[in-house]
Amino acid sequence: MVMQMLNAGGMPLLTDEHRPADDHNPRGYYEYEPVKRIESDTSWLPQAYGKAVKVVIPLVRVIAAMELHATVLLVMRDLDSVLASQKRMIEADGGVVSQEEQDQLRVAFQTEQAQAKALLNANRHQKLVVLRYEDMLANPLREANRIAQALPACVDAAAMAAVVDRSLNRSGN
């Protein structure tokens, strides 16, 4: 959702079409495949200058360890919502998720979130903006203004807020 917002607001994105939209994410993933290899290959980083790039939370520790001047928008989401969403996706693809697996994922997600936040706060080269997914759904213009104020690029907060679609939040939160 944040990448969609940034795109609508006029922020250039670094993405590819490697992972196309699907039933789970009908507007697309807005990812850039080389990001997944950031631990071993950073040759693509110069292409990211001045652009928004999606980095999933397990790889944030790599970004946080770099002397990379960046504004990092860390989107936090209610973990019950995340777990419910992942469970539905797995089950829709024919998989099964046990309560034990859910409990283990909760602990792993809590740890990843706390570590990412701490590492990013400790990096003097990076500006951290913590966003709550639920706040973005509840008041998209306020949160879009927070994003716009944090970015070095000029973006249109109203255009960003306009793309937020609460109906795509299938977790019920």
Image (cartoon, rainbow, N blue to C red):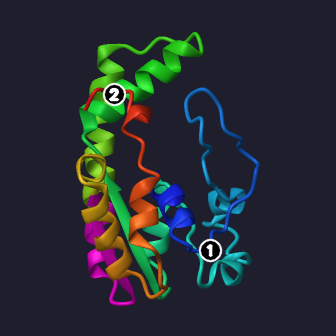
Vertical order, 57 against 79 (above or below): below
Tell me, yes or no, whether the two marked residues, 2 and 1, touch with CB atoms within 8 Å. Answer: no
Name the residue at 33% across, 52% down: 112
Is 157 positioned to the left or the right of 129 in the image? right
Mark closest to the chain's N terminus, 2 or 1:
1
According to the picture, the residue beneath numbered tag 1 turns out to be 12
Q: Position of residue 54 (x, y in %)?
A: 54, 61
Name the residue at 44% across, 34% down: 168
Q: Position of residue 89 (x, y in %)?
A: 50, 23
Which contiguous range is marked in magenta? 116-131
Residue 119 can be seen, yes or no: no
Q: Is 126 contained in the magenta span? A: yes
Instruction: Determine the secondary structure under disc 2.
Output: loop
Q: Position of residue 163 (x, y in %)?
A: 47, 52
Callout 2 amino acid:
Ser
The numbered dot on residue 96 is: none
Is 11 positioned to the left or the right of 112 in the image? right
Name the residue at 47% across, 88% down: 69
Mark 2 is surrounded, within 10 Å at the Cα level, by few (under 14), some (14 to 19) or many (20 or more) other residues, namely: some
Vertical order, 7 against 151 (above or below): above
From mark 2 to mark 1, how far is it between C-alphas? 29 Å
Callout 1 amino acid:
Pro
Using the image as rendered, state which of residue 120 and residue 111 is in the foreground: 120
Name the residue at 52% across, 59% down: 3
Vertical order, 156 against 127 (above or below): above
Vertical order, 104 against 16 (above or below): above
The numbered dot on residue 171 is: 2
For the C terminus, give its image quadrant: top left
Q: Could you say which quadrant of the image residue 115 lies in?
A: bottom left
